[in-house]
Image: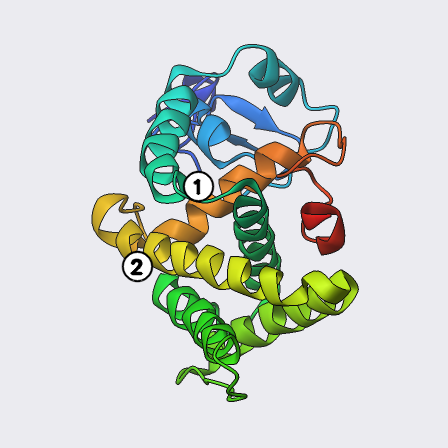
Amino acid sequence: MQHPSDNVGVKSSCPLCGTRKAKRACPALGRDICPVCCATKRHVEISCPADCGYLSASRAHPAAVVQRRQERDMRFLLPRVADLTETQYRLFMLAQALVVRHAETASPAPNDHDVAEGVASVAATLETSSKGIIYEHRATSIPAQRIAGEIGAAVRDIVTRAGSDGARLERDTAKALRALERTAREAEKELPEAGRPEASWLALAARMFAGAASQPSDGAPGSGDSASDGSKLVI
């Protein structure tokens, strides 16, 4: 018969991955998790408190697995925004931030196809407007329609604030949204996310803004304020 003391010091499986040994006490979950999940899921699936020792250490010395993922993310993203002007890039980041914020609470949860369809419908509306035709293109799925609504409202606000520069901003926004559409459509094939490959771009975007939110905000593109104050991104 096995004595209870025989199990002392034996680590259980990580509750997040179910495979690796749980070796780190996670203050956010109140449970032990494995080092890999700690490194890859912080601020993505885990709402880490600011005083977590592992979080502080990771900022000073990112784990190799996190560095490799960041490099992979950048290799995928940078070629897709390389031809954007600075204003268009800021608009790209604004739209991305709005989608990430919306996806956090949306039900049903959107996937990358919904993102692509939603931003494409807003881009098409702006492109039609630049030709002097007022026509609102509509996405077909409900999640895509909701994304289009979020972005469309932000675009209208920015264009109104821009005054005489509104037409130029509409053109820049259309190009930024087309770049975002292509990025979302290509992510599933080129950057598959384990567990939910159809949301690979959403996972990448969430990682980007989780990293930005953990840094002091200085009003720069990609800072924690990007989703809440679109005008700062373009003016």
- Which residue was labeled with disc 1? 16
Residue at the extreme left of the image, as rendered: 189
* On-image quarter of the N terminus: top left
220 or 211: nearer the viewer: 220
- Which residue was labeled with disc 2? 185
Answer with left or right where residue 95 lies relative to residue 233.
left
Number of marks in picture: 2
Residue mark closest to the camera, 1 vs 2:
2
| Residue drawn where x is 44% and y is 41% of the image | 16
| Residue drawn where x is 45% and y is 31% of the image | 40
Q: Residues within 10 Å of mark 1 (few under 14, many from 20)?
A: some
Q: For the residue labelled by badge 1, is the local secondary structure a helix, a strand or a loop?
A: loop
What is the quadrant of residue 7 in the picture?
top left
Query: Residue 177 at x, y = what percent?
Result: 46, 60
Callout 1 amino acid: Leu
Asked if marks 1 and 2 touch (Cβ < 8 Å), the reply is no
Query: Residue 28 at x, y = what percent?
Result: 65, 37
| Residue drawn where x is 35% and y is 50% of the image | 200
Callout 2 amino acid: Arg
In the displayed structure, 37 sits above or below 56; it is below
Residue 199 appears in the figure: no
100 or 32: nearer the viewer: 100
In the displayed structure, 86 sits above or below 155; it is above
